[in-house]
Amino acid sequence: MSRLPSSLGACARSFFSFGSPRLLGLQLLAAIAARPFLGPPRASEALVVIAIAIYWPLQEWILHRYVLHMKPITLGGRTWVSRAVITHALHHENPVELGPTLLPTSTIALLVPIHVGGWLLLSPSLGFACTGVACLGAAALLYEWIHFLTHTAYKPRTRWFRDVKRRHMAHHMRDPMRWFAFTAPWLDDWLGTGDPRAS
C-alpha cells in the first residue's frame, strides 16, 4: 500500500489523478466558461444557488443512510444487493484505499450527460440551465473532495473540517449507522444519527 498523501497539494494531485473528479471538474469549468455568453444572470438564478445549498446536504445524508447502507433484499428466495452497497461495503473494509472513496468514473460518465440534459430540458433559459449545471456540479465535486480528503493523512486546519473528519472516522471505526453527513455535519445531530461524543 502506498503512503497516504498528507499535504493539501499532494492530496489534490492524487484526487485529480482519478477519472471522476476530472469529469466533474471539466463539467464545472465548461459551465463557468459558458455562462457569460448566455446573457446577464437573472434574480431567479439566485434561487437555484439557495435550493442546491439546501438540497445537496439532505440528499447526501439520505443516499448515504438509506442507499449505501441498505440491507440485502430477499425476493422469491433470492437475495439482492445493489452494486453501490457492495462497493460501499468494500470501502468500509479498507478505508485507507483512496480509489473507492470516489464515485466510479463510469457512474459519473453516465450522470454528467443526464445532469446537463435535465437542466436543459427543465430550465426556462440556457443561462438558468448553465447556472444549475455549475452549482450542482460544484456541490458534487466538493462532496467528492471532502470525502477523499477525510481518508488521506491531511491534518484538518479548520474547526469545520476537523469536525467532518472526526465524525467520518467515527462512522468507519465506531458505528457505520451513524454520522452520514459531510458538507453539513450538524445534519446528523438534527436527524438523530449523530453522537455528542464524536463532536
Image: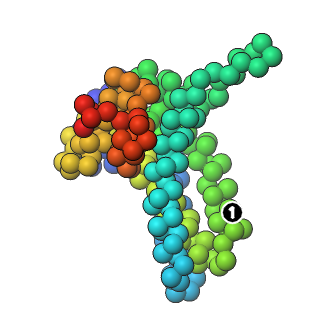
Tell me the quarter of the image containing the C terminus. top left
Specify the quadrant of the image occupied by residue 81: top right
| Neighbours of disc 1 within 10 Å: few (<14), some (14-19), many (20+) | few
**Residue 98: x %, y % from top left:** 40, 33
In the rendered image, is residue 146 in sight?
Answer: no
Q: Which residue is drawn at 28% across and 29% down?
A: 3
| Residue positioned 29% across, 38% down in the render | 165
Which residue does the image show at 58% across and 82% down from the upper left? 38
In the displayed structure image, the side of residue 162 where residue 111 appears, left or right: right
Given residues 191 and 173, the one toward you in this image is 191
Outermost residue toward the right?
A: 76
Q: Which of 185 and 24 is in front in this view?
A: 185
* Above-or-below relation of 50 to 96: below
| Residue 30 image offset from top left, x and y in percent | 53, 67
The quadrant the N terminus occupies is top left
**Residue nearer the viewer, 82 or 44:** 44
Q: Give the percent coordinates (x, y) of residue 115.
A: 63, 58
- Counting the numbered discs, the total is 1
User: Label 1: which residue?
Assistant: 117
Residue under the image location 26 percent in, 42 percent down: 163
Residue type at numbered disc 1: Gly
Q: Position of residue 119 (x, y in %)?
A: 64, 66
Horizontal arrangement in the rendering, residue 191 relative to residue 133 (left or right): left
Residue 83 in the figure: left or right of residue 157: right
In the rendered image, the residue lying farthest to the bottom is 40
Q: Can residue 57 be seen in this view?
A: yes
Decide if residue 133 is on the left or right side of residue 10. right
Q: Is mark 1 on a helix, strand or loop?
A: helix
Q: Which color mode does the image show? A: rainbow
